């Protein structure tokens, strides 16, 4: 969780600068969510798959805590930021996408932390 929180913190810090580095911020949001979910699975004695697919990771969490169903669609919205943003012109990302990505990553990390406590 420490690494997940670090990714989220980096995204927030970068979002306060100008010009906004949309792709980098969204990548760190995806990473925060991915690391959080994988950490939760490890705590449940489940070896997480080697994937960046956040919807798949959330689906693996749901049998342990049904509250994860509430973040399924939002988590999926971050998935493309894990790989696609590394390749120029693959995604069009703007300031609104950055705000949403940070909000979703925060929601996911908060939910995981709640259930790890």
Image: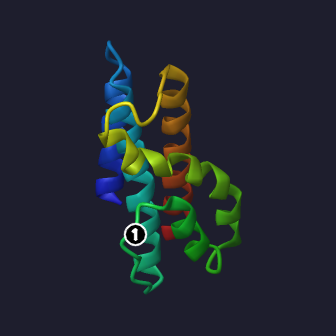
From the top left corner, tell me how far across and down residue 105 is, in percent.
49, 46
On the question of residue 37 being in view, the answer is yes
Point out the residue furthest to the top here. 18
* Label 1: element kind: helix
From the top left corner, tell me how far across and down residue 107 is, in percent.
56, 47
Q: Is residue 33 above or below residue 81?
A: below
Q: Is residue 52 left or right of residue 58?
A: left
Which residue is at 62% across, 49% downward? 74
From the top left corner, tell me how far across and down residue 38 is, in percent.
41, 69
Asked whether 75 or 117 is in front, the reply is: 75
Which residue is at 32% across, 27% downward? 14
Residue marked by disc 1: 39
Q: Residues within 10 Å of mark 1 (few under 14, many from 20)?
A: many
- Total marks shown come to 1
Asked whether 71 or 22 is in front, the reply is: 22
Asked whether 88 or 9 is in front, the reply is: 88
Q: Is residue 54 above or below residue 92?
A: below
- In the figure, residue 34 lies in which quadrant? bottom left
Point out the residue furthest to the bottom here. 45
Quadrant showing the N terminus: bottom left
Q: Is residue 77 left or right of residue 44?
A: right
Q: Is residue 56 left or right of residue 42?
A: right
Which residue is at 51% across, 60% downward? 54
On the question of residue 117 being in view, the answer is no
Q: Is residue 69 above or below residue 29?
A: below
The type of colouring in the image is rainbow
From the top left corner, tell me how far across and down residue 112 is, in percent.
51, 62
């Amino acid at each position: 969780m420490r690494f997940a929180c670090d990714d989220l913190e980096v995204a927030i810090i970068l979002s306060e600068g100008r010009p906004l580095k949309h792709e980098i911020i969204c990548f760190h949001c995806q990473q925060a969510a991915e690391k959080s979910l994988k950490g939760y699975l490890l705590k449940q004695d489940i070896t997480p798959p080697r994937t960046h697919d956040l919807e798949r990771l959330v689906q693996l969490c749901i049998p342990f805590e049904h509250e994860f169903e509430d973040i399924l669609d939002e988590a999926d919205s971050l998935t493309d930021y894990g790989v696609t943003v590394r390749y120029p012109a693959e995604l069009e990302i703007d300031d609104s996408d950055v705000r949403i990505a940070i909000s979703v990553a925060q929601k996911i990390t908060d939910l995981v932390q709640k259930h790890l406590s």
